[in-house]
C-alpha cells in the first residue's frame, strides 16, 4: 500500500507580522556583498584589550568550560556591583540584584517580558533602538511613542506626562542614545522620577553606552537615583565597553523583587552565559578600571577626527554627546529617502551607513543617517574622504 503523502506544515500565523530582517543585518550584508566600507552596524573594527583576551584564554585553558551559575559567575557579579557603587553611589547585593545575560539584548527581553501584560501601555522615545517594540508586542503590550526632534532631540516631558494613564506599565529609556548620540541630563532624570512616582510604572533603562560620554559630561544612570531605581531594570553590555560585541555578555541590575522575576525568564531564555568570558571579564574589570574610565576620551578623539574631516562636506550635524554614533543630516545632498539613498551609497560610493527611518514607528521624513565611528583612524579618514565627495 502506498504511503500517504506527508502533510505539509500549516502556515505560521506570525506573532510579529511587521518585523523583517533588521536594518543592521541588512546594511552589513550589503556592505559585505558590495565590498563597501562598513560604518553601518555598530561594532569596532579593532580588538578588545590584549590583557582581557589573555584572561579569557587563561580560563579557556584552565578547564573553566562548564555551566556558569544561572545568575552569572560570582566574581563578575561582584565586580559589576562594585562598579555601580563606585560610579553611581548605589549599593547593590550581587546575589539578589545583579544578573549576567547573553548581551544587553537578552536583558532587555527579560526585563520587558517580566512586567508587560496584555493591554499594558509602554512609552518609548523615537527614534528608538529596534529591539524594544517587538518584545512589547510579543507580550500583548501597546507602544506609545514620544517623538524626539532633530537637531537636539530633547525630551518633550509635557507630552510624556500627557500620555501617562492607568494602563501605563513601563517607560523604556536609552541614554546615551542610539542612534542620535544625545544624552539625558539631571533634569531629564528628575522629570522621569516625577512621572514614575505619579504613575507607579516600571522603568527599563538601556545604558549600554554608559561609559561613552564626551565633553566631560557625566552619565546620569538611573542607579544615581535610589527612589527611581526601586522600580527599574538597569541594562548594560560589556560588548560596547571592551570592544567585544561578538561576546554577547551584558547584565541587568534591579532590586531583589524585580530581579527574582527577571531571573525566572532568564533561566528559560538562555539559563546562563558562557563561563570563560565571564571569568575573564571579572578579572579585567577588577585589574583595569581605567579602561572604562578612559573610554569617553578614547571615543571623543575618534568623533573629533571624523567631524573635523567632515567639516568640508555637505552634511550638517550636531556633535554627538555620547555613544560611538554620529547622526548626519544629508538634506543638502539629496531629497532621496534615507533607505533608498543609503542602499545606493553602499553600491555606488562604497560606504555603508544606517538610515534613521527604521528607528521610527512610521517612516520618518527626516533626511538623516547614522555613522559608526568605532573604527581605526585610517578607516575613519577613508570614510570621511568618501563622504566629502558627496
Ligand atoms: N541597546 C542598544 C541601544 C544598543 O545599541 C545595543 C547594541 N548595539 C544593544 C542594546 C544590544 O547590546 P548587546 O549586543 O550586548 O546585546
Ligand atoms: N546595536 C547595534 C547597532 O546599533 C547593532 C546590533 C545588531 O546588529 N542587532 O548598530
Image: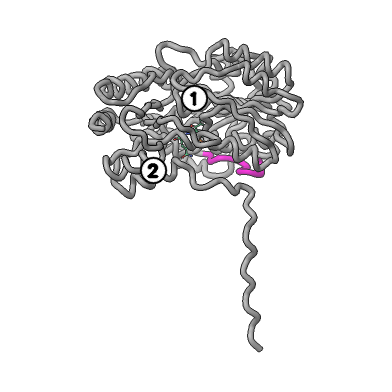
- The C terminus, quarter of image: top left
Question: What is the magenta range?
Answer: 267-275
Q: Is residue 26 visible?
A: yes
- How far apart, in angstroms, are the residues tagged by discs 1 and 2? 21 Å
Asked if disc 1 is less than 8 Å from ligand 1, the answer is: yes
358 sits to left or right of 47? right
Asked if disc 2 is less than 8 Å from ligand 2, the answer is: yes
Question: Which image quadrant for residue 8?
Answer: bottom right
Magenta region includes residue 296: no
| Residue situated furthest right in the rendering | 166
Q: Vertically, is 385 above or below 22? A: above
137 sits to left or right of 319? right
Instruction: Work out whether residue 141 or residue 372 is closer to the camera in this orientation and state it.
Output: 141
Q: Vertically, is 98 above or below 5? A: above
388 sits to left or right of 40? left
**Label 1 secondary element:** loop
Q: Residues within 10 Å of mark 2 (few under 14, many from 20)?
A: many
Q: Is residue 290 visible?
A: no
- The N terminus, quarter of image: bottom right
Instruction: Work out whether residue 12 or residue 340 is closer to the camera in this orientation and state it.
Output: 340
Q: How is the image coloured?
A: one colour
Q: Which mark is residue 17?
A: none
Mark 1 and mark 2 lie on one chain; the one further toward the N terminus is 2
Q: Name which residue lies at 61% across and 37% down.
A: 109
The residue beneath circle 1 is: 177
Q: Name which residue lies at 69% across and 31% down.
A: 121
Residue 74: x percent and y percent? 60, 30
Question: Which image quadrant for residue 48?
Answer: top left
**Label 2 secondary element:** helix
Q: Which mark is residue 28?
A: 2
Amino acid at each position: 500500500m502506498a504511503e500517504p503523502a506527508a502533510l505539509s506544515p500549516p502556515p505560521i500565523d506570525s506573532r510579529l507580522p511587521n518585523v523583517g530582517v533588521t536594518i543592521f543585518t541588512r546594511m552589513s550584508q550589503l556592505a559585505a556583498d558590495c565590498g563597501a566600507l562598513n560604518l553601518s552596524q555598530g561594532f569596532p573594527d579593532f580588538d578588545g584589550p590584549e590583557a582581557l583576551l589573555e584572561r579569557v584564554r587563561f580560563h579557556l585553558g584552565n578547564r573553566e568550560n562548564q555551566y556558569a551559575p544561572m545568575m552569572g559567575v560570582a566574581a563578575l557579579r561582584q565586580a559589576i556591583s562594585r562598579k555601580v557603587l563606585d560610579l553611581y553611589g548605589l549599593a547593590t547585593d550581587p546575589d539578589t540584584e545583579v544578573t549576567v545575560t547573553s548581551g544587553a539584548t537578552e536583558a532587555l527581553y527579560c526585563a520587558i517580558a517580566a512586567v508587560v501584560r496584555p493591554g499594558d501601555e509602554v512609552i518609548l522615545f523615537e527614534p528608538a533602538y529596534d529591539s524594544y517594540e517587538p518584545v512589547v508586542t510579543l507580550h500583548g503590550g501597546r507602544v506609545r511613542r514620544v517623538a524626539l526632534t532633530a537637531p537636539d532631540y530633547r525630551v518633550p516631558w509635557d507630552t510624556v506626562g500627557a500620555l501617562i494613564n492607568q494602563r501605563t506599565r513601563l517607560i523604556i529609556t536609552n541614554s546615551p542614545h542610539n542612534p542620535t548620540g544625545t544624552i539625558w541630563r539631571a533634569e531629564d532624570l528628575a522629570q522621569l522620577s516625577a512621572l514614575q512616582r505619579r504613575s507607579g510604572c516600571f522603568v527599563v533603562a538601556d545604558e549600554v553606552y554608559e561609559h561613552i560620554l564626551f565633553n566631560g559630561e557625566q552619565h546620569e544612570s538611573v542607579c544615581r537615583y535610589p527612589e527611581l531605581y526601586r522600580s527599574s531594570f538597569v541594562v548594560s553590555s560589556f560588548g560596547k565597553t571592551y570592544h567585544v560585541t561578538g561576546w554577547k555578555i551584558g547584565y541587568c541590575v534591579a532590586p531583589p523583587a524585580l530581579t527574582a522575576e527577571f531571573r525566572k525568564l532568564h533561566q528559560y531564555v538562555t539559563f546562563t552565559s558562557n563561563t570563560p568570558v565571564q571569568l575573564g571579564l571579572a578579572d579585567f574589570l577588577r585589574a583595569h578600571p581605567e579602561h572604562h574610565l578612559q573610554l569617553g576620551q578614547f571615543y571623543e578623539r575618534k568623533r573629533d577626527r571624523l567631524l573635523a574631516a567632515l567639516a568640508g562636506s555637505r552634511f550638517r550635524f550636531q556633535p554627538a554627546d555620547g555613544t560611538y554614533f554620529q547622526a548626519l543630516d544629508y538634506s543638502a545632498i539629496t531629497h532621496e529617502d534615507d533607505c533608498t539613498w543609503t542602499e545606493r551609497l553602499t553600491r555606488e560610493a562604497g560606504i555603508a551607513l544606517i538610515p534613521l527611518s527604521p528607528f521610527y514607528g512610521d517612516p520618518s521624513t527626516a533626511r538623516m543617517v547614522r555613522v559608526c565611528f568605532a573604527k581605526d583612524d585610517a578607516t575613519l579618514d577613508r570614510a570621511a574622504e568618501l563622504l566629502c565627495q558627496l
